[in-house]
Each structure stands twice: as structure tokens, then as C-alpha cells.
Amino acid sequence: MGKQVGGKTLRLTALRLEALDFRSVRCRSTSAPGTVRSMEDILTRVVVPLPTYETREKSPPPPESNSVEFMHFYRSLEKEEKSQLLATLSQDFGVDHKGVSELAGKLLDTQLRDLATILQVEDRLRYSLTPRYKQLLNHISRVEGGVKFLVDLRADLLEIISSKGSDSPHIRDLNGTLKGLLSEWFSVGLLRLERITWQSPCEILQKISQYEAVHPVRNWTDIKRRVGPYRRCYAFTHAAMPGEPLVVLHVALTEDISDNIQVRAVMKKLATLDLEEDVNKVNTAVFYSISSTQAGLQGVELGNVLIKRVVRELQSEFPHMSQFSSLSPIPGFSSWLQGLLSQHRKEGRMELLTDHEWREVADVTNTTPDTNALDALRKLISTGEWTRSERLVHVLEPALMRLCAWYLYGEKRRGYTLNPVANFHLQNGATMWRLNWHADTSPRGVANSCGIMVNYRYFLQETPSNSAAYMHNKVITVTEQVLGLVSQFQKNSKL
Amino acid sequence: MGKQVGGKTLRLTALRLEALDFRSVRCRSTSAPGTVRSMEDILTRVVVPLPTYETREKSPPPPESNSVEFMHFYRSLEKEEKSQLLATLSQDFGVDHKGVSELAGKLLDTQLRDLATILQVEDRLRYSLTPRYKQLLNHISRVEGGVKFLVDLRADLLEIISSKGSDSPHIRDLNGTLKGLLSEWFSVGLLRLERITWQSPCEILQKISQYEAVHPVRNWTDIKRRVGPYRRCYAFTHAAMPGEPLVVLHVALTEDISDNIQVRAVMKKLATLDLEEDVNKVNTAVFYSISSTQAGLQGVELGNVLIKRVVRELQSEFPHMSQFSSLSPIPGFSSWLQGLLSQHRKEGRMELLTDHEWREVADVTNTTPDTNALDALRKLISTGEWTRSERLVHVLEPALMRLCAWYLYGEKRRGYTLNPVANFHLQNGATMWRLNWHADTSPRGVANSCGIMVNYRYFLQETPSNSAAYMHNKVITVTEQVLGLVSQFQKNSKL
Amino acid sequence: MGKQVGGKTLRLTALRLEALDFRSVRCRSTSAPGTVRSMEDILTRVVVPLPTYETREKSPPPPESNSVEFMHFYRSLEKEEKSQLLATLSQDFGVDHKGVSELAGKLLDTQLRDLATILQVEDRLRYSLTPRYKQLLNHISRVEGGVKFLVDLRADLLEIISSKGSDSPHIRDLNGTLKGLLSEWFSVGLLRLERITWQSPCEILQKISQYEAVHPVRNWTDIKRRVGPYRRCYAFTHAAMPGEPLVVLHVALTEDISDNIQVRAVMKKLATLDLEEDVNKVNTAVFYSISSTQAGLQGVELGNVLIKRVVRELQSEFPHMSQFSSLSPIPGFSSWLQGLLSQHRKEGRMELLTDHEWREVADVTNTTPDTNALDALRKLISTGEWTRSERLVHVLEPALMRLCAWYLYGEKRRGYTLNPVANFHLQNGATMWRLNWHADTSPRGVANSCGIMVNYRYFLQETPSNSAAYMHNKVITVTEQVLGLVSQFQKNSKL
Amino acid sequence: MGKQVGGKTLRLTALRLEALDFRSVRCRSTSAPGTVRSMEDILTRVVVPLPTYETREKSPPPPESNSVEFMHFYRSLEKEEKSQLLATLSQDFGVDHKGVSELAGKLLDTQLRDLATILQVEDRLRYSLTPRYKQLLNHISRVEGGVKFLVDLRADLLEIISSKGSDSPHIRDLNGTLKGLLSEWFSVGLLRLERITWQSPCEILQKISQYEAVHPVRNWTDIKRRVGPYRRCYAFTHAAMPGEPLVVLHVALTEDISDNIQVRAVMKKLATLDLEEDVNKVNTAVFYSISSTQAGLQGVELGNVLIKRVVRELQSEFPHMSQFSSLSPIPGFSSWLQGLLSQHRKEGRMELLTDHEWREVADVTNTTPDTNALDALRKLISTGEWTRSERLVHVLEPALMRLCAWYLYGEKRRGYTLNPVANFHLQNGATMWRLNWHADTSPRGVANSCGIMVNYRYFLQETPSNSAAYMHNKVITVTEQVLGLVSQFQKNSKL
């Protein structure tokens, strides 16, 4: 078995790498020692040591074939092996701790000397803190397809970090280093805003269909509509990943900010594909979907920049446009509510609904207004059955609205709002503007958020200060409507 | 006076920056104290402190207007003031030395503890070594025109560093930080290779004409020829600086590597603009000019990458192309020679020429073959007069050729060859292939290098190893022809 | 009737004017008989008289609004009314017969005079033969969307001519005039060859899917495959009809001319969408589908020119490509065969199959080898049931092949081959090269042509002479294989 | 000698024409008989006979090599030979007069029969009036570069017609046929409006510089200015002649219609190349140069259409733009004036100037106010010396202005204004709006039109009616200013 692995390594070394197609050279061995050895062999060869501080500018880059070999090797691995490889890379090819330590000592020694010396030792220290693998990442980025490779590799890293118990600090370091590099390469000056239309290449439109997470695209007529009249679709692309939309924003052009009634309009009424736009009817931009397409770019903020650029673009196309708002889903509300109900059930608490509301629920469900009604309610909500009874809908509207308002406004994680969509828009400086009942009545909408949707509105003058207030002081900018619902919830819940 | 300056600052703060045109708000005051104060005011406002390590990912970017304000302010300054501003920026808004020192101490303390802690302290240390101004540079890069601004700012920095006695370590640090950022932004994956033709936008062709340093472009017919048949012109451009060629390579397509006779062919014979290329006559690519256009990208190696990309491009266009070589000028040879002659004059040494050669020089110049002849020779070379006498040309050819060979091969600076063009090609892995007598007989060519030119040839299989040998071990790959000339020089000079 | 018409006029008046651009020229008549009158009114206003011969170059064009009005009016009409309008236009706004007649007389009178006079009278006569409506057509072509309007109008004309008994000579004249104009506007020099890929605009790919007549496109994966590796898709477009493919050619790149076995390869085996092409495996171009998209361009030969241009394009991409052939369907064979069988049934003739073949058919169908078997055969063929019996397939193969060969080669209309696909390729100079049994076994293929397909092969050196032989002398260039089948048919049928 | 020619013909026949490069095969023989014979041989072969009326749709086009051969042959000829060839082509390969005559007779015979027959005979007659060479022209247009060839051939035809006494009616017929075809191919629907900027391909800008007739382009800075801020440059291009501007319009964007004072502004003040346009300062479009580039498109009206399209383009860019006017030169005024002065000199008439004016002229020139002064005036005007004397300038202003007004308004050819620029704008429907004294003081301006320029203004609502009034009734729309000057002239001249 060991031979096979050795054989593979040999083959690897012998092959002319330009022509190499690793797809057939799958690494199937499961015996850890052998694979690990072969991995280390490759890494040792491919991840060249950092030049000394003195020669750091005199060192020619290693041959491109190093990067290509690494990319092919990595792609040939099974998931588990990838994980192993990254562990080895991050652990054995990282920072030279001894060197760092020596320089740290030297820095302390020099504190009494002149500033020039301090600066120089600091610079050496900074250099010595560079992980050896950083160079490899840099070189890979220069190979054709290299940037995309690194984006995908980071997606693997993130999966490892989140899924595993193996919370290795080295892997975290590798992730941090790679994120830093990606942030440089995907900095705003290098992104290109593209408007996607029915004239755009099919390849792009197909990708946008596949990536669309918020409102899944059903067919080509559907995607045609989303780039048609009274709609805009924008994406950021990057020179190093041509033809690959990084983040996609769908906008509806309307006369007013869409609420529950106009939601359907947004989605269905404007179906006429050949309609010509009447500029006078366009006063508002409703961002109804924003999707990031690259898992590996997590934390590299693109979405907020895209929204800002699109706002500028729309203002120049429609000088009189005055309202900008999202119409957002509320993923997680239903499951949060189920959790809450379960907990109250356990604790025998009934204050989520008013007495009147419980009576009504009990009445409709032929139960008693106690834990029986609570059980019935849990079931109704998990099945979505409640939407079939007009009476229930009528009773539950105020309850679900105030619960939802609380979920969005009051439920926190490390001081920031728990709901990721809310968090995204609040970071961007939006205002939590209006909860809309009966806004997404699709099965998906009912299952996720009891049909409720929310507008995060962008008041352009205030977004910077809102953003800062939220980021620094965890203050959410919010309207009376939402606050009213929140205080109803609090009154009820004796919070 | 102070008031005026203060007034300006006030105005700055009050103005809506989008509309602001600083061109008319030139800062003309020369009184250092006031300006310095206003500078510090602006910097303090614009260069926001680094977030703490803990909040570094939670901090929204400062408003774009910060970057725009800094750019406008900087552009409004006189040269001296810019220098002052950069000094202040680099000194007062750099690294927090105290913080670094504390973390260094902490790191030493933790050396006995677990690896996870070490890694975390290292990461904090790394972060604390970030100069405060690095953030500003990053944010500027995201503003429209920001990258170009930073490239130009770095050109200013380099000028300050090279021109002044004021060899401030802080300015060097700022320069190092900026160079690091530019290297990321201008990494190969983000550059775009463009072939320039007569169909290219006028704007690009005009810029290429202006930037051409090796063989100045005289007029539009001249530039048309340089993008015409049997020529190729390639440039790297960058998404963040559209329409701006960064480095330009001119290639002549020939049947053999141009030497002295074909030089003229390269420059003049192929003048027929409407000639159609005969692919069968193209076997060789002669790189006859490579120009970097952005002073601020010094040290960000683009030229060598461009040559490699162009070689690939040419190979795919002409699959049978087999020879790649530069035909390079030798700037500095004549002035080096003059220096050598002066020194020998002082020291009364005569071994640069053989006895026979001195006699011939004396004979032609009506002098005696001693320091008189030496003086005469110095004058002849400084005026270029020697080219008018066939006898002198005949006598001096071997002498100048061996001197030039020594100049290119033997004269070193820190172990690397002194001549910058040679250094460039040797770093790229080229071979010092052939010195060509009578190769550039233009006044400029005679004045710079006594009409000699040199081919640095690229043997594609060997460039990586040549490059490494030169960079690491300072070994120059060289042909018999050049070595022969060098040893003649050494024999003569008793070296 | 009058009411209906009145209703329409009302509708016209009521229409939202954005769509309509009648700006000043509202159609206000409401009286019914009136529509005819209103038509004439409009035509009289819009179709301005020809200038006199003398002032023909001094006349400014009528205002664009004339053309726009006509276009809107025409589009607002029902089918029957369009027909009426075109009848009126062609009849009342055509040639001034009296004027022509006078000039004809004058020409005869001048036959004895000088040549200059004759030439001038001829020129006047030529001018007088211009129908008044020709000017209108010319002006419409200059309006935005005008050319497309005229192409569609000609489609209407062709439908009128073919469908109606009303074989009006005026309508034919109008059709001839319009065809002449379209031929000028769509002459080859003005067509643009475009290669369609997955990078082409979605709009184009959707249209190509819709227009595909030969092998209907099922879904977007299907169309993606047709523009993917080992395929080429080319279209002619025209500056005056942007985004509108006029004629589309689908090509498969193969190692040999596809016959029945490789048909499936062409259609299915190459399904791997991300396959990379291996140039060495490409020796042959198989044109497997050519579709005209504009009914109104009938008779304006585009398809043959497209094939020629594509051949040149492919030769420059694949210099070693040596075989060019269609793989064509045989629409109409089955229905022709059914007709033949019916006729033989009536006449009690049995010679279409040999005695042995009839016996086999009878045996399988439990009939007797007489008209009973013939009836059974007719049913088998009309239902496609025969393909389910291996024995029948075996028996019928030679019979169907020789019948099909005769259908393609022997069945004529005005001396040219009856089958339109054959006629197209023979006009282009192709050779009727090979009939392929079991070539298209889809239900459609079996229903149309008993699963048989045919290759029309293009021997590039011979296409001009083949084309001329066919066009002038009705001679079909054909291979031994096809001729052999034909003579078997003839022997059998005692023809 | 005859042999040589014969040899050439032989060679022509034998060569594979695709590869043929006639540039080296110049026809140098001067012996008329031989050349003529060879010409007829080639024409007979290349200009195939018209198909019969019956087979006209069944005839495959002649091989492309026919067209290519003709093009190469024609290009190889000297000017005189071209003329000969065109004479032969037009005379011997034109209309079949006998056939026409027979059909004319037949038409007269059929006048009593049914309409269908009449229509059919008319169609045959129409077809028989087609010159045989028309087919050749059609086929040439389909070859690559064919349309440009025909445009240039028409330029040759026009030169022959205008220069020679040989006013052959056949050449006129050929010219008419070709013009008809060009009019179809260059109809508006097929033209593409391009805005030319400094980003446009160098090739285009170089051509526009070369073609500029009104204000010659001096250098590249000059052309850069003409496509820079406060300027627009538009051109029509055509799909069949890519990269070739057909007609070019230069526009200045100003605050008011430029008169003599602002002329310089138009030409010089706006020199700052990097100026940014202030939309609020743009109210007026001044067309200061329109140039046709293709002599062979004479009579194919492109310029007027270009102006209309540009007006639409400008209105959409500057919705508030309200004034459109030319600022036009008056070529021919000075020479017309010289002619007038000569004639008056002969006839001894002195009424062109008032007595007072003559006295002043005499005074300044030291002559007597009689024919001596007249002679002096002639000389002053022919040399432009008058502009150096302030007194003369003052005296002559009213005289030259009223003479110029008369020249533009009163001097006619066949009822239309003599001055070609005036004629162009009046046909387009412009108003003769204002004469501007001291408007073009360049030597060229003084020499051509005594420094006077004129605005033809476009009132958009009135251009159609103005155009019709001028074209049909020869009525010039004119302002009070111009009329006033005209009547002063008339009063003075006793007209």
C-alpha cells in the first residue's frame, strides 16, 4: 500500500506538470501514514522557505509549476485528505515561532535605543510573523484560475472550522491569512459593477439563476422577468474570475415601497415581459434579493458595497428616485418561535399570547386554553395549517407580528441582532422600517416566517451614522411601527 | 497668518466634499508652524485610529469623504508641503510602539505555555505592528481614482527618499507599507495583457508615445510603424487604472537575432506601413524596448512578467518561433568609461589600451602616446568625434568592445551588475549573449554607449535556473563571445 | 360587417397613445364603409405620387411620420383587413400604365434616331415602370424597425399568395418589388457572420431555440450542448435587424461523416458539456441543421451563402479539415410513400415490394401477400409499428431504402427534385452522397422518413460546377450508393 | 507589343485568382488595339449575360472569382485605360435595345387585353431594361471590399463625366445605375451613427483628420481638441466599409450661436483640453464643419440625414438645447467677386460701390475714384492687403457684406442658389440666418470669402416645410438681416 502512494509521488515528480491531468490520478489510499508522508513531501517541495529578511526583495519567485502542482494535488484529494493537508500546511509551514521570539526579545532590548533601530526591528518582527504558507498563497493567486482556487479553498477551510470539533488554532490562522489576502484582492477598486440583462451572456444568467437563494428561479421565463422591465439586476465581477458574478442584487422599480399587497406585484403582476418602463411610475427601488455566490468570500464585505454602488447607479438613471428599501425575508423566525413555544410548554408559561388570543385558539382547535392550546398552536405553526382558517389568521396576526418584531429587534447574539439578514442591513446603515403581514404567502414564506416580510429602508443621509451606531454601540435604528410591536410584546411577556 | 490657515481648515470642514474643487484652494502659505498644525488637524481627523484587535472586524469603514478629503488636500499642496505632510503622516500616524513592546513582552512570557496562546499573541502582535496610516491607504484605494493616486504618492515618496539627505526611517516604513499594498493590488492575476495596434484608442497610443524611454517616438507616423507589420506592442493594464498602460514592451519580428547590421533594419527598413507580414519570415522576437510608465510602481516587478506573458502570446501566434532576445541599449557605459579614463589619468596609468592602440590614437590625434593621447581620447569620446575617422573606429573597436564587456559583466554593485538594463534581464533569467559593434549609430547611441548594443537572450528552458543563479549566487550566465572580451580586458588591465 | 369595422376604428382611436405614434395623425373616421375609404384616405396621403422624371432627384423625402403612420395603421389591422389593404395598395398605387404605354410608343418612334435619345427614353421608361408604392417601401426601410416591418409584411404577402385562390397579379407585382428591395438590403456584403456560443446574449440563444426547425430544442441544457464542444453554431445577422438571427447553421465536428451509427453520437454521446475539444479528432464538419428564421426572406438566398462562409471559417480554424457534409432529414418521404401505396392499392399493383418481401410482410402481419398485406403495410408505416418487429425491420430495409432513393432522386417538380431539403443542397452544389438506414429513430424521424437520413456532401472544388449543372440542366450529382438504390427501385418497378 | 498584352491575358486566365496579386502585374502597354482587345476579352468573360426572364430566379450567381478578377484588372489599369474600360463596359454590356423595343411593341399591342397580361409584359419590359453590367456590380458588392471598390469606381465615373468633353450617354447610364445601387446599399437603415472621441481607434481619427476639408487639421493636438470637451464629432459608418467614416460632422457646444466674435472662441478659446463640460453652459449646437469623405457617394444624400440624426442625439444628451445652427464658410465668394469686378471693369461700370466708398478707396490707394480705383480694389482683394488698413476695412465692410448677401441669396444656377454650402443647408430646410463680418480672419478665410461666414440655422419645426419650399419652388427662407443686405445691394446696383 505504501508503495502505491510512493509510486504516485514519484509519478508526480516525474511528470511535466503543464500537461498533467490529475483527474485520473485520484489518491485512493486510506492508510494515513503513507498519505501524510506524501503530503509532507509535496508540501516541503512546494512551500519554499521564506527568504531571509535581507534577501526578501532579491528572491525570484518559485517556478509557476509549484503552484500548479499544489493545485492539482489538492483537487485530487478526497475531502478528508484535504482536511489533513490543510492541517499539515497550517501547522508545519506557518510562522517560525523561535525567530519571532528572538526578535521580540531583541525589540525589548532596543527600547532604550534610537527610533530608527526600533523601526527596523519592528519591520523584521513583522516580516518574521509572516507564515511560510503565505508565499504559496500569493504565488497561486498569480496562476490562471488561482484566485478562484483560493476562494474555493477558503470555503473548505470555513467548513472545516465550523463543522469540526477540531478547532485548531493553526487552521484559524491559515483562514485569517487567506481572508486578509482575499480582502486585498477583492477590494472595491478592483470590482466591476455589471448590469445583467437579457442581452447578457447566457452563461452569466444561468449562474445567476443557480445562485439565487432568496427567491429560487424556476425557469428561464422566470429569470427573463427578473432582468426585464421594472427590474434591475446588478452583480460585482472581478478581473481575476471572469464570468463569475460574486454577489448579485435584484431590484424592483416601483411607485412605493412594497408591502404585503405589492409583494405579489413585485413577483407576479409585472409579468408582462415586453412592457415598456414608464419612468414616471418609478420612484422607489426595492431590493428584493441579494445573494453572495462564493462561500469562500465570507467576511469579505461585498454586499454592502454593492448596495451603495447600485444606489448611485439608480440615482443617475432615475434622478427623481427618492426611496430605497429592501423587502426582506425573515429566515429563522418560525424555528425560533417553535423553540420559544417548546420552552414555554416546558415551563408551563402562557404569556406569549393574551388570554383572549388563547381562548380563540382553543376555540378553533377544540382544545382548552392551556397547554393543550399551546400544543395545538405549535402544530398549526409547524404545518402552516393556521393559514387556512380565516379566524385563526385574524387572531394570530397581532401575536405573530409582535413576536416577529421582537425576534428581529430583541434577540441578540453578542449584542448584535440574531437574524442574519437584519444584521446585514443594519450593518449597512439601514433602518428597520416596517413589518409586513401576509407578505410572502408561498409555502416557503409561511414555513420560514409565517408569511411576514420586513423592509429595511436606506435613508441615504443617515446610513453612515446608523451603521456606526450599530457597529460600535449596537444601537438599532428603527421606526415607530416596529417599536410599537416590540413594546406590545414586552408588555405581554412582562419583559 | 495662522488665521488664514485655520480659515482654510475650517472651510475644508464645512464644505460638502462631493462638490469641492480644491484646485482653486491652493495652499500658498509658507509659514511652517501654521501649515503643520493644519496638516495635523486634517490627519488627525482623516487617519482614524486602528480599531482594537477585538473589534477589528466589527468596524465599519470610515466615510469615503475622508479619503476624498485627503486626496484633495494632498493634491493642493506644493512639493515641499507634501514632503512635510508625508513626514508627519509616517511619524505620528504609524505603529504604536508601546503597544508592540507590551505584546512582545507578553509573547516572551508565554513561550512556555501552549501553542494556541502563542498563536493568538502572535496574531495580536502582527496586528499591532500595522501602522495606523495603512488603513487610510486601504480606504483610498477603494475610491475612484484612488489607486492611481497612491501610485503617484509613492512616486513622491521615492523622490523624497532618493533626493534628500533626510533619510527618515519613518518615510522608509511608509514606503515599505505602500509598496506591499501595491504589490498585492498589482499582482499578476489582476493584470491584463493588451496588444496595442493602430486600432487601439488614440488615448492609449498617445500615452505609449509619451512613455517610450528607450527609443523616443518622434511623430505619429513613427508610432504607427511601431504597432504595424513585423512589430508587436504589448502592455499590461489594470482594472483600477483603466486606459493607463503600466509597462510597455515593443517587439520586432525578424528572421534572426538583430545585431549591428539588422539594427537599422529593425528601426528603419521595415518602414513600409502597409506591408503584409509573411509568417515564414518570422522566426525571432527581438524585444527592442521595454518601458515602465509608473514611477510609483518601482520594485513591483511587472516587466519580467510581461516578457514571460508576451513570449507565451508570441508562441501561440507563431508556433515555430524559436529565438527570443532583447536588443538593448547600454546606458551609462560612456560615462563610466570617462570616469575610468579620468582616474587613470590621475594615476598615470595607461593600460586601458595596448601600446599599439595608444600609438595609433597618438598618431591620429597628433599627440604622443602618453597622457596627451589619453586626454585626446577622453575628448574624442566625449564629443563622439572618433566616429568620423575610419582609422580611429578601426583601432578603437576592440578596445571599446572589451571595455564594454567588462562594464556589463565585471562592474558590480552589491554583487549585482551595475548596469540597470543588464540587471533587469539577468534577473529575468536571460543570458548575456552578444555585444554588437556599430549597433546604434544615432548621436544618442554614440553618446551613451559608443554605439554598442547588447543582446540579452532568453533560452526558455533555462531562464528559471539562470534567474535563481543570478539572484541567489550572483552568477551571470554569459556566452563565449562576451567572456572572451572580458578576458581580453582582464589580460590587458592586469586584473 | 360594418359594425365590426367600426368597432376596430374605435379601438384604434381609444388606444393608449404611448404605443401608437400617430402624434398628429389620428384616424378619426368612424363610418363603416368608411374603413375602405379610410384605407384609401390613408394610402392617398401616405403613398405620395412619384416625382416627375425631371424632378426625381430634387424631391425631398416625405416626412418620416408618413412611414410611421403606415406601419402603425397596418399593425392595427386584422388579418383580413391587411389583405384588403395590400390589395388596394398594389392595385391603386402601382405603375402608371398610361404613362408607360406612352413612353413605349415614344420608344418605338425613336428607334430610328440617335442612340443618346434612345438611352434617354429607355431611362424614362424604366423610371415610369416604378410602382408608386416602391417609394413608400423605400422610406419605411429607413425608419427604425422599418426593415423588420417589411420582412414581416412580405411574409403576409407570401401567405396571401399561397393560401388564396385570389391569385392577383398586382399582389404578385408588389411581392416582386419588395423581394427585389430585400435582395438589395440583404445582399451578402451587408450580412454579418456570428458564431453563437454559450457566451452569446441569452436573447439570441432563446431565438435560436425557438427557430430551430430540424431538431427541436427541448430545453436549455439542450441548447447549451448545441453551442458546446465539438459543435459550432453560426448565424447571419443584419445591421438593420440587430439581435435577430436570419439563418442559423448547426455543425457537428466529427472524425468522419456521420451515418446511422454516429447520428446518435452527434445528438447524444457528446453530451458531456465540459468536454474539451481534441483538435486531432476533428476532421469533418457535419451540417446537421439549417433553419431560416424569416418567412419574409423567402427567395432571398441566405442559406447557401451561410454554408460557404462557414466552410471558410471552419477551414481557417481547422486547417486540416477535409470533409464537409450535411446530415439531413427527408421530410415528406413517408407521406409520399403513403400516397404511392394508396395509389397502388387502387390500381391493384404490387410491384413496390418483391414477392419475397410481400410474403414476409404477410407472414408477420397474418395476412395474405396481396392487397391485404398492402393494407397492413400502410397501417404499419403510418403508425411506425414496423420498427418494433426485428423481422419487419430486416425485410423492409432494402425496400424502404430504394423507395427513398427514388423519392429523393427521381421525384421531380418542374424538373427539379421534389424534396425541398435536397433541392436546397443540390442548388448549392452538393453531391447526394449517402442514404443512412436507422439514422433518426426518434418518433419524429420514423414518422417523417422511416428513420432514414441522407448526407449531401460538399466537395469544395466541384460545388460551382455541380450547382450550375443542376440549376441549368437539372442534373443531380450523385454517388454509386444512391444510384444503385435507384436502379433497384427502377428494376423492381419496371420503370 | 501585342504579344505582351496577350501574354498578360493568358496569365490572367491561367492563374488561380484567389492568390493573385495584381499589384505587380501592371498593364504598361500603351498600344490601344491590344489593350482594347484584352479588355473586351475580360469583360466578355466576366460580365455574364443576363439570364432570360424565365430563368432569372433559377440562375446561380457566377463564381466570386469573376468579380475578383474584374476588381484586380481594373485596379491594375492606368487612368486612361480605366476610362476606356468603363466606356466599353457601358456601351457594349448595357441594355439590349432590341429586346426592349420588341417588348415595348408587345406592350402597345396588349393595351386592349386584360390587366394581368399588361402587368406581366410590364414586368418583362422592366427586366429587359436592366443593363447587363448591373449584375456585375451586384456581384462585386458581395465580395469582400467590393462595396468600397464600387464607391471608388463611381468617383472615377464622376471624374470622367465632369472632366471630359466626352459626354457619353452610356457612361451617364452606368453612373445612374451605380448611383441607384449605392443609394440602396447606403440607405439610412443601414448606416451607423458613431460618436468619435479620443477613445476611438487611432485609425479612425487619422482618417477624420485627413478628410477634414472645412478647417484643415494641423496636428494631433488639434484633432484631440476637436473631439474634446464642448465639442462633438459624429460620423456615419457602414457595415460593408468598416472603419471608414462616410460623412463627418463637427459640432461646437456653446451658449449662443457663434458669430464673428465667438468664432475665435469656437476655434481657439476652448483650447483647454482637460476642461470639464458644464452642462448649464450648453444651449446651442454649432455645426462648424461637415465633410463627405467618399467622392463616389455624390448624390447619395448622407449629410442631411447625419445632421438630423445628430440633432436627435444632442437633444437626448442635452434636453434643454434649443438652438441649432451651422457656422459655414462661403467658398467661392471672393472669386465670384473678382469675376464681377473684371466684368464691371470691362463695361466701365462703377455701381458696385457707392461714390463715397469709391472715394475712400481712391484716397487710400492713391488713385482716382474711377477704373483706377477699381483696379486697385481688385488687387487689394486678390492679395488680402485690404485687411491691413483699418480705414479700408471700415469702408469695405458694408460693401462686402451686401455683395456677399447677394452672392448667397441672389446668384442662382437652374434656379437654386449657386453656392454649394448654402444649397446643401437650404435643401435640408435651414434658414439663411446671419452673415458674420470678420468671422474667419485666417488667410484662407480672407482669401475665400473676405473673412465673412454665415449661419444657416435649423428651426426644427420648420425644416420640412422650408426644405419643400426650396426644393419645389426654389424659395429661400431668410432673415431680415440678410434680406436687408440684399436690398441694399439691389438699390445700389439698380437691379
Image (spheres, coloured by chain):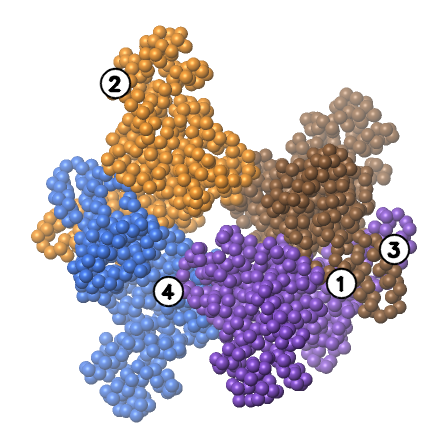
Chain colours: A blue, B orange, C purple, D brown
Mark 4 vs mark 2: tell me if same chain.
no
Q: Nearer the viewer, residue A47 or D435?
A: A47
Residue type of the residue flagged with mark 4: Ser
Q: Is residue D170 visible?
A: yes
Q: Which residue is mark 1?
A: D54
Separation of disc 3 and disc 1 at Cα? 24 Å
Q: Alpha-carbon neighbours of circle 2 within 10 Å: few (<14), some, or many (≥20)?
A: few
Q: Quadrant of residue D390?
A: top right
Q: Element type at marker 1?
A: loop
Q: Which chain hosts label 4?
A: A
Give the residue drawn at x 52%, y 67%. C209
The kind of secondary structure element at disc 3 is helix
Q: Image check: D455 left or right of A127?
A: right
Of the residues tagged 3 and 2, which is closer to the observer? 2
Q: Is residue B67 above or below residue A288?
A: above
Secondary structure beneath label 4: strand
| Left or right: C466, with C45 as reference point | left
Q: Which amino acid, by three-letter code, is at mark 1?
A: Glu
- Mark 4 and mark 2: Cα distance apart in space: 75 Å
The residue at 80%/25% (across/down) is D375
Is C267 left or right of D417, judged from the image as shown?
Answer: left
